[in-house]
Structure formats: structure tokens, C-alpha cells
Image (cartoon, rainbow, N blue to C red):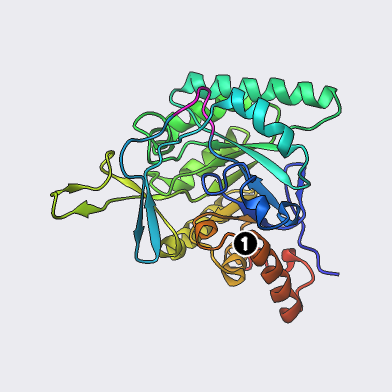
Amino acid sequence: MIDTTCRIADVVFKNPVVMASGTFGFGREYARYYDLNKLGGLSGKGLTLHPKEGNLGLRVWETASGMLNSVGLENPGIRRFLSKEVPYWQQLDTVRIVNLGGHSIAEYEEGAQLLEQFSLSGKAAGQKAYDMIELNISCPNVKEGGMAYGIHVETAREVVMRVRRATTLPLVVKLSPNARDLVGMAVMCEEEGADGLSLVNTFSAMKIDIHKRSSVFENLYAGLSGPAIKPIALRMVHEVCKAVSIPVMGMGGISSAEDMIEFIMAGAETVQIGTHNFVNLRAGEELTAGLEAFMRREGIQSLTEIRGIL
């Protein structure tokens, strides 16, 4: 019997395949293509305290082996998520992760408090609303907040510390590859009580329209994701896994079972699938099956046999 289970804090994932925030909505659309209960987990669309329309202008640009996006955290706001999406999430048998963004430290903190209060109310009524928070301090596509908090360790420390105090839910911090000191950032998150880390978010990048002589994006820069970033993301996950003792959710251009195995061998507890969801609407189902097939072929009984072997 192959064992694919993983654990972050007291949350058990049936397998390491988690759908990344910003690429999967809240799951409803993909549920038309396969059973989401096959997934290890899903991280919902990034949420801010108040609804956000996102960036103006062009938002997506395909590149060689990847894509650029400048969505700008468009989302319905936490309160609408709680009323409209949580009842659907409560029907799912997979780990449900709330991705929390913000535009100020106070907004991050208030958002975490709101999620905490709702979670406690649900538990009192015998219904768990969600399993953990993924604190997003790494989005490169908003002018305030987002990556601005994810670049400098001491600025990020204030956000992580205050959100940690605001919630008893398991807390994973999503890190930016654009951080000045990524390993230092990871160590700081562990010091401040994070239960895990997820990395990497998109790389700050650019596309120029040479006829208009301007960037194709209103925000000038956008976030690069997809297979093009995988070797760099893999190296970063390896470096962070060597520096901390809390589990890491590795991501960055994963599009095959072999890619997932690489991240787990680099030390990741689970992996997240992002851009590949746009290429293959059944990616979650196929990657889960592909991982188990690989383990059978290689005679691997448990992921602990190969995790962090490098």
C-alpha cells in the first residue's frame, strides 16, 4: 500500500498535490472536470478584507515556456467568501486553504481576525470552514502591500507576527522569490510561529510592446510563472528546506509527476500546481495519478523515503 500522506501542523493531506492560489478560483469551475476530493488540497483565490477589482488593462501574456500575469488580486473580499464560498468548501473532502492578502498591516491583521472568528463559530456548530491560512506577502502585482511586505525581512516580520497573534489556525507564509534574503525571510517566519512556508510566487518580469514603445501592462511589471522558472524555484525550495525545520509547500512551473518528485527530493512536504492548471484543466487528477504510478514503478512505499534526500 503506497502512502502519499503529508502533514503541516496538525493538518493531514491525503497526497502532496495542492492547487495554487490564483489559478483555481475556489474550485467550483474545475469540479466540472474531475472529483476535487482526489486532491491533497486547494488554496483559494487570494482574499483581501474588502472586495478588489484588480488591475486595469491587459492582465495575461503568454511567454516562451510560461506566462506573465498582472491580475492585481481581484477578489470578492473576505465577507463574501465566507457567505458564498465556504458552504461549498464544507462539502469537499480535501485540505482547504484560505489565501490572505492585504494592503496594510492593519488590513492583514483584521482579515486574520475575521477568519479566526468565523472558524471558531463553525467549530462550535460542528462544521469546519477551512483548514489553514496561507499568508500572501509575495504578490508582485499590487502597488501597495503584497510583495512590498515580502521583500524586506523586518517589514515582513511585523505582518507575520501580527497575523500569528490574530489566529489559532495553522499558518503558512507564501514567500516571494524577489525577496532580498529569501532564506533569512524563511527563518524569520519560523521564528514568528509560522507552521509552514510556501514558495515561490511569481518572478517580477516585463514585456514591452515595441510598436507602442511601452510595457503591455498598466503596472509596467508583471509576474512570471510556468516551466521557465522551475529550475530556479527548485533551487530556492532546496535552500529554504535546508535552513528551516517547518514544512515547505514547493511550487514553480510544476507540470508533471517527475517535477513533483524533484521538489519532494529537494525537501518539500507538499507541492502546489499553478500555471499548469491553465494548460490542462484536469491537471490535479492526472498529476495525482502520475505520482502514484511513479512510486509503484520505483518501488517507493512512502514519500518520506525520498523527501529531502539531496
Does 43 lie within the magenta span? Answer: no
Q: Quadrant of the C terminus?
A: bottom right
- Whole-percent x and y of residue 254? 53, 63
Which of the two residues, 308 or 123, is positioned nearer the viewer here?
123
Seen in the picture, residue 251 relative to 115 is either above or below; the reply is below
Label 1: which secondary element: loop
In the picture of the structure, the residue carrying the numbered disc 1 is 282
- Whole-percent x and y of residue 171? 64, 36
Left or right relative to 116: residue 1: right
What's under tag 1, amino acid-wise?
Answer: Arg
Most common secondary structure along the magenta stretch: loop
Seen as rendered, the residue at the extreme front is 32
Seen in the picture, residue 298 relative to 181 is either above or below; the reply is below
Left or right relative to 154: residue 255: right
The quarter holding residue 43 reads top right
**Residue under the image location 36 percent in, 58 percent down:** 62
- Whole-percent x and y of residue 139? 43, 40
Query: Which portion, as a residue range, is magenta?
Result: 47-52
